[in-house]
Image (cartoon, rainbow, N blue to C red):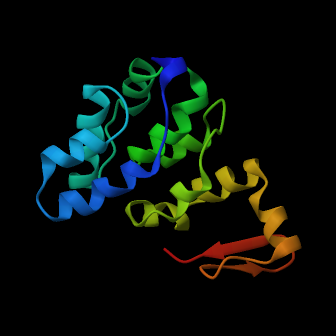
Amino acid sequence: MASGFVTNRAESFVGPLLERGNRLAALMLAPGTVEMKQAIVDARISGVSPPDALAIVERAVPDPRYHAHLLIQLGAYDLAADAESLHVSSGLFWDPAHSGMRGTPAFKRIVEQIGIPAYWREHGYPPQCRPVGRTDFECDR
């Protein structure tokens, strides 16, 4: 499954589907294995990432390039920031389902590792973020 794992924007519909009470459709659009899908839906509903998030992700997709992406889906932001590889779509950062991540130290670590703040300093910050001093920034949730 590792080589065939694909991320896409369909997962951005998981939250809105859950808000409408459509758990089955949310499960179908969540990425990964059945266990991964269930963990994502449960984490979204409870607002709590599973204590065994990394193990769930490793079972779902052994390829570490996708671990950070899936850990973010589970709300395990600190684990995502510590992931071996940060193969993460920046669109995931702005998904309303992950708005809580933007105010965390993990978010800063992730975007700094990817090099996003350097880009912002050179080309301008997005509307939801602003510089704080010469080298720091903050973003709205």
Q: Nearer the viewer, residue 90 or 51?
A: 90
Q: Residue furthest left?
A: 21
Asked if residue 29 shows in the view, the reply is: yes
Which residue appears at 49% of the width and 60% of the height? 101
- Residue under the image location 49 percent in, 22 percent down: 4
Q: Position of residue 87 (x, y in %)?
A: 63, 38
- Residue 36 spot, x, y in % from top left: 32, 31
Quadrant location, the N terminus: top left
Tell me residue 48's x, y (percent).
30, 50
Residue 61: image location, x then y, percent? 46, 22
Residue drawn 24% across the image and 39% down it: 28
- Residue for point 41% across, 46% down: 73
User: Where, by quadrant of the figure, is residue 37 drawn?
Assistant: top left
Q: Quadrant of residue 35?
A: top left
The answer to whether one can see residue 42 in this image is no
Left or right? Give the position of 130 relative to 40.
right
Lateral position of residue 9 relative to residue 88, left or right: left
Drawn side of residue 82 relative to residue 18, left or right: right
Q: Is residue 50 left or right of residue 84?
A: left
Q: Is residue 102 above or below residue 68?
A: below
For the image, the number of numbered tags is 0
Q: Is residue 127 above or below residue 84?
A: below
